Image (cartoon, grey):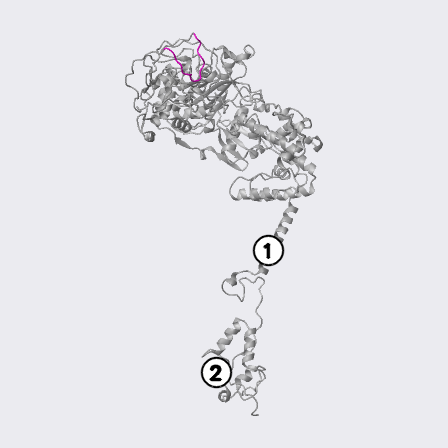
Amino acid sequence: MSEHRRKLPQPQEGGRAAARRGQSGSSSGRRAAPRGATGSPSDSYGSGGEEERPYGGRAEARRAAQRGSGGGRRRAADATAPGGRRGPGGPNGPARGRGRAPGPAKKRIIDYPRAGKYGVGRWVPSWKLVTGLFIGFCGSLVAVAGIAYAMVSVPKVADTARAQNNVYYWADGSEMVATGGETNRQIINYSQIPEAMRYAVISQENKTFETDSGIDPKGIARAFLNMAKGGQTQGGSTITQQYVKNAMLDDQSQTISRKFKEIFVAIKVGATVKKEDIMAGYLNSAYYGRGAYGIQAAARAYFNKDAVKLDPSECAFLAAMLKGATYYDPAGATTFDPAATPDANRKRAKAQWADTLNKEVQYGHLSAAVRNTYKDLPKWQNPRSNTRLSGQVGYLVDLAKGYIINNTKITANQLQQGGYSIHTTFDKTKVDALTKAVDKVRKANIKPKLRPKTDKYVQFGGASVDPDTGAIQAIYGGEDATKHFTNNADQTGAQVGSTFKPFVLAAAMSWGARNPNGDPVQAQDERTIVSPKSLYSGKNKLKIQDYDHTVWKDKNGNEWLQKNDGGQSYNPPSYKIDLREAMRESVNSAYVQLGMDVGLDKVKESVLDAGILKSSLASANYPSFSLGTSSPSAIRMAGAYATFAASGKQREPYSVEKITDKDGTKFLHQDVAKTKQAFTEQVADNVTDVLKTVVEKGTGTNAQLTGREVAGKTGTTDGNKSAWFVGYTPQLSTAIGMYRMDDNESNKGREFLQMYGTGGEKTIHGASFPSQIWRDYMEQALKGKKAVDFPTPEDIGKVLNDTPSPTVTPSATESATESPTPTPSPSESVTSPSPSTSETCGNFGWNCSDTGGTGTGGTDTGGTDGGVSATPTETTTSGSTRGNANGNGGIFGGPNG
């Protein structure tokens, strides 16, 4: 071997020593393999150090390590570890596979977590991964959309006409009527739809209809966002989407999946159907209210003409109905929502109608000259119903519909499609008895042909409620539901007058009168529960004070002098009258002052607790609030008095017991029925005891029943425009109202007319026709039922103002302007003396002077807060210790309520 040849470095424990060990190992009988026999450089390297190696050691090891994976490094480490197994010869033997370059690492389809990265970098996806996933996701969406688009079909207008009957049942289970399946629809061609109607809808709902693709991405996003928040789903934003929604009757659920389906159908309709056909389809399938589907049926329902003859004003009107006839039909829909009164609906309809016409001008679809010829809503006709809904049945069905829509999960659209069995609370015997009682009075007394100026437009309304359950057992909505559309048993706007006084008494017994001499800040807490034996002033033209002795004034600085019916003063010279007698004779001055002492906020709370709806209340900022300037419905008044009949337990009036369909029971009232203790038994029973005296020997004697205890209250309102009697036994509470109003003046506001001379009576009051109807009906409604007495009340409260009164000195004149009331004639005389100007009031305002004052004592308008509507001069006799036997006057509920 040449000296100039470079010797390779020997591995540890290699060289000759290793060779010798190898030789000694071979002496066991096995020949050592020749060098290079394995074909591996490592064999030569590990077997001895004397021969030249074909490859470099360390350099090649580094290259092998760089090409290898973690596993290769672990094998190398294992091979060099002390005591480690190197090869067949043990730790000192040749390394098995040493020097062999491992193969490349296996590649993954999705490199995540990322190989070769450590720490946070291992979990950060690469741009290739992100891009790939995004492309894959978009591709999947396109594929799904394509499949969905291919699967949906274009709806047909004729398919939207499907509807089933709803069957309504009486309380005894017998069938009342099957209705709803008759769909009022007549499909017409595009050429028969007026251009003005098309442009009215386009201008108001979808100005880009003629150029858009059929969907509104922003509107869709809003709808999904609203659903994600848990709110109500929103309707389609374009005419195409709304047409699709109307046509998809196979699925009326308000879900995201249905909304997606609508979108794909709308896209397909927009791409494959002509705009003319879409417009015709929408206008022929839309619901316009009054049972009318489609433009032709709507034209007949509102204007009694064919659609082709509609003018631009009428078209704009019908376009407004598409917003929701419940809130835009000028005839009103109070059975569906108390806010949908005729007046409120008329205002909404007019605003929408005007806006539509203005937009048509703005978008060039209507000339300004033509627009200016339309100043008010077009003349519309009152709704018509089918003959199966004649008599009271139509009112009963409407009432049940309103309850279902407002109190169950069944929507108006679902109800319209039908298929429900609706079991109501209505007692056929009681409904018939109430109708006969009203017809008896009407036929005997109301003569519109004989006395058209006084007897025309007279209306009656009534309702009966079971105090134990709240079930509405009977109503009287009008002469005929197919002729008179407004349900008089529901909210009509007629004020209830002195039938409100029991709520004032209940508030005084529940909350108490405020301490007039206490700290004003603590006055709300320093209260005295009022006994019905408490004494208040029964004086006519009483100057009303606040609880702290300050004279009450309105925002204009006007004082309030409260008049009693017919200018009547009670119990001179002291004018003291206890609250029982004041209720019996319906003395306004006593209860107005009591309301001020308690606080009108507490009176209002008492009214609400009894079950009267807040939406029907007048402002509680005026003293007249205690005298019934509010306008609850007959149903609500019967329900509120039922709270007293049930010893303070308040139950919401309801009209539907159960609803079923082909899939089973959809609603049970017993699952939602609630009872609350609105008043303590002590308070409610004392109110009842006071109201018993009204019927026994007060203004309500006309309502006495044979062998039964009755509690009730009469009510008459400002200008003799409405009269009421509300009364109850322990088993049944009934309210009867009477008023005059021309419902045929469709384009005018609903104005209540005076009833002086109506029915041949000088004035109409609660003690006349309303109490007569109440008595005749209740005799029949309770026939065969055991008479039940009211509970004996426990004593309650403290007697206020029981100190002797000062001597009264008459005054020469009365200079203050009085509270609104019929103006007495010059011949009217008041034999009771009037106090002098220096006289002061007692602690709770029962003995006040009537001089001074500069205002009207009630400047707000009648029908809202007790106002000052003009009233005719009436000649009355006053000065006795009780009211006129005929109850003349009746401004806020005088002697006859």
Q: Secondary structure at mark 1?
A: helix
Q: Quadrant of residue 730?
A: top left
Q: Secondary structure at mark 2?
A: loop
Q: Quadrant of residue 384?
A: top right
- Residue on which the image places disc 1: 134
Amino acid tagged 1: Phe
> In front: 812, or 828?
812
Q: Say the numbered circle drawn on residue 92.
A: 2
Q: Is residue 19 visible?
A: no
Q: Is residue 738 above or below residue 262?
A: above
> In front: 730, or 553?
553
Position of the N terminus, as image quadrant, is bottom right
**What type of secondary structure mainly makes up the magenta span?**
loop
Label located before the other in sequence (1 or 2): 2
Give yes or no for residue 817 being in the magenta stretch: yes
Q: Residue at (53%, 32%) from the top-left corner?
A: 421
Q: Which residues are magenta?
A: 812-826
> In front: 193, or 94?
193
Amino acid tagged 2: Asn
